[in-house]
Image (cartoon, coloured by chain):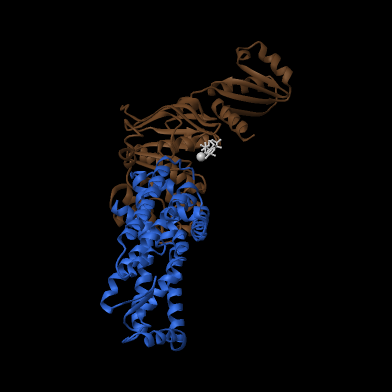
Amino acid sequence: MNYEKVIEILGLTKKFKNLTAVDDLDLTVLKGDVFGFLGPNGAGKSTTIRMMLSLIAPTSGTIKIFGKTLLTDRKDILRRVGAIVEKPDFYKNLSAYKNLSILGKLSMGEVSKTKIMEILELVGLEKRYKSKVKTYSHGMKQRLGIAQALLHDPDLIVLDEPTTGLDPQGMKEIRDLLIMLSREKGKTIFLSSHILSEIEIVATRMIILDNGKKVVEGKVNELLNKNKLKVTFEVNDINTTKNLLETTAWKDKIYSSLDNKIVFILEPEEIAPINKFLIEKNIEISAVIPTRSLEEYFLKITEKSTK
Amino acid sequence: MKSLISIELYKIFRKWRTYIGFAAVTFLVLLIQFAISLGEKDAASRLTNQLSESFLMVGNLLNGYFVSYMILNAIIVNIPFLIVLVAGDMLAGEATAGTYRVLMTRPISRFQVVFSKFLSSLIYSFMLIAWLALLSIVLGLILFGSGELIVFQKGLIIFAKDDIIWRFILAYLMAALTMCTVASLAFLFSSLVENAIGPIVTAMAIIIVFAILSAIPIDFFQTIKPYLFTNYIFSWNLFFEDTLNYTELLKALGVLIGHIVVLFGITAYIFEKKDILT
Ligand SMILES: Nc1ncnc2c1ncn2[C@@H]1O[C@H](COP(=O)(O)OP(=O)(O)OP(=O)(O)O)[C@@H](O)[C@H]1O
Ligand SMILES: [Mg+2]
C-alpha cells in the first residue's frame, strides 16, 4: 500500500466579511483514494475546492498538493489536476470541440483531434461535438465538464458535485467512470457531493463538512456498514412490548420509545431475532425501519442547514 | 503565451460585439465618402475653387487624402465608444460567463491571462484603426483620386503628393495609441466587476467628462488639461504640420504610453489578488 499524500490541507479557513465559509479545516487525501467530501448546501465544499485550485485565496491555512505548496508551485500542480468547480460553464458561442481544444492547449500544449474525440465519446457527446455549447442542456454541459477535467489525463481529479443535473443513467455512467478511473488507472479522486449514497457507492474515505467545519472523518465502509444501526420497530402495544423486553438482554439496547415506536441500537444480525421474539409473544409489528446512524446524522445536519 | 494571445483573439473575434466597431467604422466611412461624392460638384468644389483662385494650384484638391483626413477628424472622437465595448468586456465578460473556473484552473499564471487579454484588447484597437485607415485611404483614392493635401491647422498648409503617406501612417498609429489608452481604461474597470455593462458605461462617462473638462476655459481645468488623455485624441494632427513639433509629439507619446502602463499595472495587480467567485 502506498501512503503518498496527494492533498494535504492544514488549518484552512476562508472568511467572507463576517461569514466563515470554511473553518480551520484539516484533511489528507492519499494516492488512489476516492475521497468523498460530503456536506449539505452551503457547507463550504465549493469554497474549499476553489481554494484548492487557487481560484480564491485562503484567509489562513496551507494547501499542499503532490507534496508541493499551492502558493508557490501553482502551475506544476495544476498541470496534473483536472477539475469541475460548481456548475459547468463554457465559452457558449464555441463548439464543445473548440472549447476542449482551447482548454487542452492551455493544459498540455497541443491536443490531437483523436484525443478530443476520444474524451467526447467517453462522456457521450461525440454526436454533438460541433454544436455550440449554448445549445447544450445542463446535463450535456455537465458531461462536457467531466470531459475537460479528464482531457489532459490528470493524476488528481477534483469534482464538485459532478452528477447534479444528470439523468439517472448519466449519474450511473459517471459513477462507474469514477470507479474505473480509480481502480484501473490509479487516479486519485476528490469528489464533493451532498448525497450520502453517492459517496457510499464510489468513495473509499470521506469527511462530512458542516458549516465549514469537519464533523466526521473516516473510511466509508467503516463509517457506513460496520456501524451499528438504529432500528425502529412500530408495534401495536408499546407497554406490553417494553415489559416483555424487560427480562431480556435486549433491554439495554433500547435507545428510545415514543408512541408506538421503539428504537434499538443493533448490529444488523440482531434485527431478525428481536423480530421473531416479539412475534412469538403475539406483538403485532407493523414496520421495522433500520437507519444507519451516519445517514440519520447527515440528514439532521442537512435539515438544520436548510432551515 | 503566444497560444494564449491567439486564443484570446479567437475569443474576441467569435463575439458579435467585436464586429459592431468594424461595422460602425465601415458604415461611417462609406457614408461620408458617398455624401462627398454626391455633393462634390457644389459644396466641396466651392471650397477648392476658392482656393484655386487665391493660389496657383494644379490638380484636384478634393482627393482621397483630403477625404481621409476629414473622415479621421470627424469620427475619431466616437471611436472610443466602440473600443470600450470590447475592452470593457475582456475581464468582466469571462466573469459573467463563469468561464474563469475552467480557464484559471489551467497551468497558466494570472499574469499571463491578464497580459494576454490586455494585449488582445490593444491589438483589437489597432485593428479597428487599421481598418479605418485602409478603408478611407484606399476607397478615397479610388473614388476621388490622388493629389496634394490641404489642411487647416493654425494656418493653411498644403502637402505635396509625395509628402503625404508617411504622415498618414504615423497619424493613424498615433490615433491607435490614443485608442489603446481608452482600451486600457475600460480594461481596468473590467477587472473590478463581474459584468461588462459597468466598465463600458464608466469608461464612456469618464471620456465624456474629461472631454468636457478640457473644453471649459477656466484656469484650473486648463492646467489639468495636459494630464487628461482625452486631450490627446487629436494629437495625430501633429503629423500634419509643416515642421514637426517634437516637444508636443513626445509629450503626447509620454502621456499616452504612461497612461497605458500605469492603467495596466493597476489592472494586473487587481487581477492577481482577485478572488474568482463566479
Ligand atoms: N462570494 C461569496 N460571498 C459571501 N459568501 C459566500 C460567497 N461564496 C460562498 N459564500 C458562503 O460560503 C458558504 C459556503 O458556500 P459554498 O458554496 O462553499 O457551499 P457548498 O458546500 O458548495 O454548497 P452547495 O452544496 O450548495 O454547492 C455559504 O454560506 C455561502 O453563502
Ligand atoms: Mg457547491
Q: Which percent across, then down, holds residue B215?
A: 50, 61
Q: Which percent across, then down, holds residue B190?
A: 46, 51
Most foreground residue, A78 or B119: B119
Can residue B60 be spotted in the picture?
yes
Can residue A100 be spotted in the picture?
no
Most foreground residue, B213 or B229: B213
Instruction: Tell me which residue sits at (48%, 36%) in the image.
Output: A47
Q: Which percent across, then down, holds residue A177?
A: 40, 43
Q: Quadrant of residue B73?
A: bottom left
Q: Which percent across, then down, holds residue A38?
A: 50, 33
Taking the image as shown, residue B58 lies to the left or right of residue B17, namely left
Most foreground residue, B102 or B191: B191
Taking the image as shown, residue A124 lies to the left or right of residue A80, namely right
Query: Which chain is brown in the picture?
Result: A
Locate the C terminus of chain A and report the quarter of the image it occupies: top right
**Chain B colour as displayed:** blue
Locate the N terminus of chain A and report the quarter of the image it occupies: top left
